[in-house]
Amino acid sequence: MDLEARAHSEHPEALRLWLRLLTCTQLIEKQVRHQLRTEFDTTLPRFDLMAQLERYPDGMKMNELSRRMMVTGGNVTAITDQLTREGLVERLDVVEDRRAWRIRLTLKGRNTFRDMAQQHEAWIVSAFNSLSKKEIQTLYKLLGRVKQHTHPTPETETP
């Protein structure tokens, strides 16, 4: 049973919409996890770490990776250890802080991530194939309004 099945017709439509959004997100994520495992023998956390590093060609400090991924330093260390053994990332000394490491993708890691990212994009696009381009644009715009309302910018916050 998915989250949406918990909702009943007497519940407010907004609650039912929320549960449908969660259900869709979980279903798409489950499919992506499966595809990453099947096609690349990897996990979503490994993909996410590589995606962060891809944005920073010179690498990132471990604590910054942990903060951006919103996971513990131990989680980042375990994933980094795996990716290092596979030659996908490398640890570099941080001159100004001998206790820290900077992590960056190797050439092999960049090439591997590029292949995974292309497939990942195709999987996400495919998940929305039942919608027209106009429907996708409308949904994107509407969810943007929800985002703005629930996460106001400093200019729109009330004192």
Image (cartoon, grey):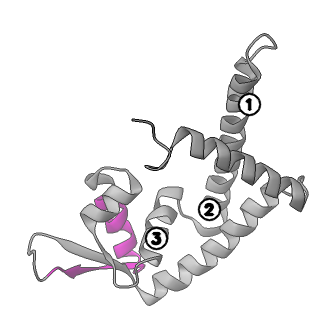
Residue drawn at x 27%, y 66% is 62
Q: Which mark is residue 50?
A: 3
- Residue sitting at the far bottom: 107
Which label belongs to residue 133? Answer: none
Is the Cβ of the residue at disc 1 closer than 8 Å to that at disc 2?
A: no
Return the residue at label 2.
Answer: 36
Disc 1 residue type? Leu
Question: Is label 3 in a helix, a strand or a loop?
Answer: helix
Question: Looking at the picture, how far across and down is residue 84, in whole percent?
Answer: 34, 75
Q: Position of residue 52 (x, y in %)?
A: 44, 69
- Image-based side of 80 in relation to 3, left or right: left
Q: Is residue 90 magenta?
A: yes
Residue type at mark 3 is Met
Residue tagged 1: 17
With 37 as the anchor, is 159 left or right in this view? left
Type of the residue with mark 2 = Leu
The residue located at (37%, 62%) in the rendering is 79
Q: Is residue 107 above or below residue 25?
A: below
Residue found 71% across the figure and 26% down from its top: 14
What segment is highlighted magenta in the picture? 76-94
